[in-house]
Structure formats: C-alpha cells, structure tokens
Image: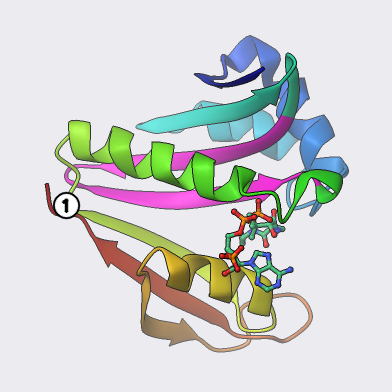
Amino acid sequence: MLSIKEIDQKEFELCYELDSDTISLWTKKQWHSEFNKRGVKVVGIFLKNKIIGTYVVQMIIDEAQINYFSIKQKFRRKAYGSYLMSYLIKECKKLNIKKLLLEVSETNSIADKFYSKFNFFTVGRRKNYYKNGSDAVLKEKKLIK
Ligand SMILES: CC(C)(COP(=O)(O)OP(=O)(O)OC[C@H]1O[C@@H](n2cnc3c(N)ncnc32)[C@H](O)[C@@H]1OP(=O)(O)O)[C@@H](O)C(=O)NCCC(=O)NCCS
C-alpha cells in the first residue's frame, strides 16, 4: 500500500539512509540541521511502510523552496515521483503558496525533464555552483488555485 506522510525530526535517520542510497546529498548532521530550519517540512512516500522517496520543502512567506527531492533508484520511472510532486503541489496550494522554487544541476537532464513535466521554468543560473564545476539552474513554478 502506498502512503505519504510528514516525517518527524526523530526519524531523520530514515531520510539520511534514503539519501545515502540515492543521491548522497547531505551528511547525517546536515539532515539533522535541515529539520531545525524555520518553515521546513520533510515528507516521505512509503510503499508497504518502507520509505521509497522524500522531499524537503522550506516555506518562506508565500514561496516554497524545494531543498531536496528524490526517489530510490529501483522505484524510479514508475510514477512515484510524479505522485509525490502532485502531493507537494496540492499541499502548497492549501497553504496559499504562490510560487515553488528549486535549483538543479545543469547536468541532471532527468530531473530537468521531470520538472518540465510539472511546468517549472528556468529563471536563472548560478555559475560553477556545484563541486564538479557545473552550474545550478534555478527553476520556478507559479501556483494558481
Ligand atoms: C527526478 C526523479 C525524482 C523522478 O522520479 P520518478 O519517480 O522516476 O519520476 P516519474 O516516474 O514520475 O516520471 C515523471 C516524468 O519524469 C521524466 N523522467 C523520469 N525519469 C526519466 C528518465 N530516466 N529519462 C527521461 N525522463 C525521465 C519523464 O518526463 C517522466 O514522464 P513520463 O513517464 O510520462 O515520460 C528521480 O529520477 C530521482 O529521484 N532522481 C535523483 C534525484 C534527483 O535528481 N532529484 C532532483 C534534483 S534535486
């Protein structure tokens, strides 16, 4: 059975383990501190009670920044990412968020296709942003009710 629920700070190791298994973006310490940031919500998608994906979003007034979004490798291309993104958008609309923002590496063409499907548009670029020298592409999606 598929379910989506908010992840409590006490369960931050769930996120760390999922991340280690997927894109290894943050250390344990970084995950822990992410939960302490003002306006942050961490949400997981669970299949038969096992986490298969997660997102981290930070609400700042009427905007929401997606700080993290990933689905475990073996569950990709099965529409779970779309299901989770649709949930994120619905939740943001409920909270009267007007705009969703994110940054993604210019080399991540899969994520680019994924976000295009959800009508995120490129609005800027940070040169040499990542450790490997690639640029970060800034994307946004306007939310209308
Ligand atoms: C990006 C990501 C979340 C997509 O999750 P997913 O569950 O595989 O996505 P879905 O199955 O819902 O696919 C939705 C759309 O994304 C695009 N897409 C997803 N995987 C793709 C692939 N391997 N090749 C090309 N397009 C792809 C397609 O447009 C697809 O729509 P379609 O199936 O109608 O063609 C997943 O690949 C992932 O976790 N990647 C690593 C983390 C990451 O890069 N996160 C984003 C940057 S922080």
SS at mark 1? loop
Q: Which residues are magenta?
A: 52-72
Q: Quadrant of residue 101?
A: bottom left
Question: Does residue 33 appear left or right of residue 22 in this picture?
Answer: left
Residue 28 in view here: no
Question: Does residue 48 appear left or right of residue 141 in this picture?
Answer: right
Identify which residue is drawn at 69% across, 83% down. 107
Image quarter (top left, top right, bottom left or bottom right) of the N terminus:
top right
Identify which residue is drawn at 83% across, 50% down. 73
Identify which residue is drawn at 44% across, 41% down. 57
Q: Quadrant of residue 28?
A: top right
Front-most of residues 117 and 105: 117
Question: Does residue 45 appear left or right of residue 67 in this picture?
Answer: right
Residue beneath disc 1: 98
Q: Which quadrant of the render holds ligand 1?
A: bottom right
Question: Does residue 57 appear left or right of residue 54 in this picture?
Answer: left
Q: Position of residue 13 (x, y in %)?
A: 77, 22
Instruction: Give neighbour class at mark 1: few <14, some 14-19, many 20+ (Cα, 10 Å).
Output: some
Q: Position of residue 7 (x, y in %)?
A: 57, 19
107 shown above or below 67: below
Q: Position of residue 136 (x, y in %)?
A: 56, 78
Q: Is residue 77 magenta?
A: no
Identify which residue is drawn at 52% across, 30% down. 42
* Amino acid type, callout 1: Lys
